Amino acid sequence: MKPLDCRYYRVYTDTGTPCDESNFSFVERSLPLKVHQTALVLVDVWSTHYIDSWLTRAREVTDAGIMPILNSARKAGMTVIHAPSPPVADRYETAPTAPTAANDAPDWPPAAFRGIYRSGEQAVFGRNQEPILPPTYKRYKKELDIADAAKPIPGELVIHHGAQMHEMLAERGILHLIYAGFATNWCVIGRDYGVLAMNSLGYNIILVRDATTGIEFHDTVDDLTATRMTIREVETKYGWSTTVEALVSACEVESQ
């Protein structure tokens, strides 16, 4: 595998240069990854979603960004890990039938208190119930799946949770995790198999910045500010970023 062109964001300056934010900058480097120590992690590359505008954008990213790097990773012999939500992972034969328990934490807080909506006497601490959610969840039971073009092929891994993925990575001796998928500011960073969790375990994180998109807000959707700021957060605190073009190029040597 040819070295992969990556970057991170440096919030420091050289000696003699004022340590002002205006002097911060990117650091570019080519990382000499070994294909057998590297995995492509595809987070929630879904077939449907309740946010229509986001789904349109995600489908474009899947076609233009995720599929080229998925095809290149497959040709290079790189480990491919599909990381949809657990209910979707349950449908695939490549997922172990008895996944490792995610954690052994105490059963606390109480069930009615957990989450942002809450119920019963704890409802006063929760957000208002959203009427769109019950029919959405009902539809998801039938329709939610990995997008057809990105579905696993025989031999590829489908994981349920972070503990299971960590175990698989250790078995294979994988050190470098290249992330793509959705949503940048939700599941890609926040899942227990996402950027923050795997960074905390010591893995080298690389986010493909044009193979992901976030959930935007009414005042950010025009310029995708939430997506861009999440990518910058990863570049600053948790790892590196790269591009579709750079990853496809890095994989080509290995596949020849």
Image (spheres, rainbow, N blue to C red):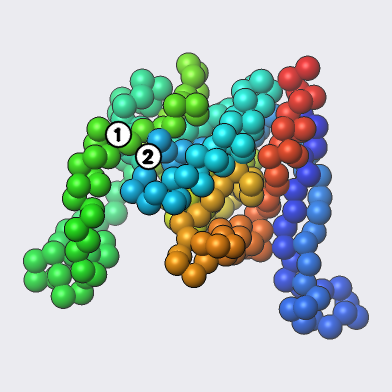
- Specify the amino acid type for callout 2: Thr
| Quadrant the C terminus occupies | top right
91 horizontally vs 189: left or right: left
Q: Distance of mark 2 from mark 1, alpha carbons?
A: 7 Å
Look at 60% across and 43% down and name the residue there.
Answer: 211
Look at 74% across and 78% down and name the residue there.
Answer: 21
Q: Position of residue 89 (x, y in %)?
A: 36, 32
Q: Vertically, is 187 above or below 9?
A: above
Q: Judge by depth and name the residue closer to the eye, 161 or 9.
A: 9
Residue at the spot of label 1: 143
Q: Secondary structure at mark 2?
A: loop
Q: Judge by depth and name the residue closer to the eye, 215 or 33.
A: 215
- Specify the amino acid type for callout 1: Glu
184 horizontally vs 113: left or right: right
Q: Is residue 37 visible?
A: yes
Q: Position of residue 241 (x, y in %)?
A: 68, 50
Whichever of labels 2 and 1 marks the residue nearer the N terminus, that label is 2
Q: Position of residue 193 (x, y in %)?
A: 46, 45
Q: Is residue 73 visible?
A: no
| Quadrant assignment, res 138 | top left
Q: Judge by depth and name the residue closer to the eye, 36 or 231.
A: 231
Q: Residue furthest right?
A: 16
Q: Vertically, is 12 above or below 147?
A: below
| Quadrant the N terminus occupies | top right
Look at 51% across and 47% down and name the residue there.
Answer: 57
Q: Residue furthest left?
A: 120
Residue at the spot of label 2: 48
Q: Are marks 2 and 1 in contact (CB under 8 Å)?
A: yes
How many labels sit on residues?
2
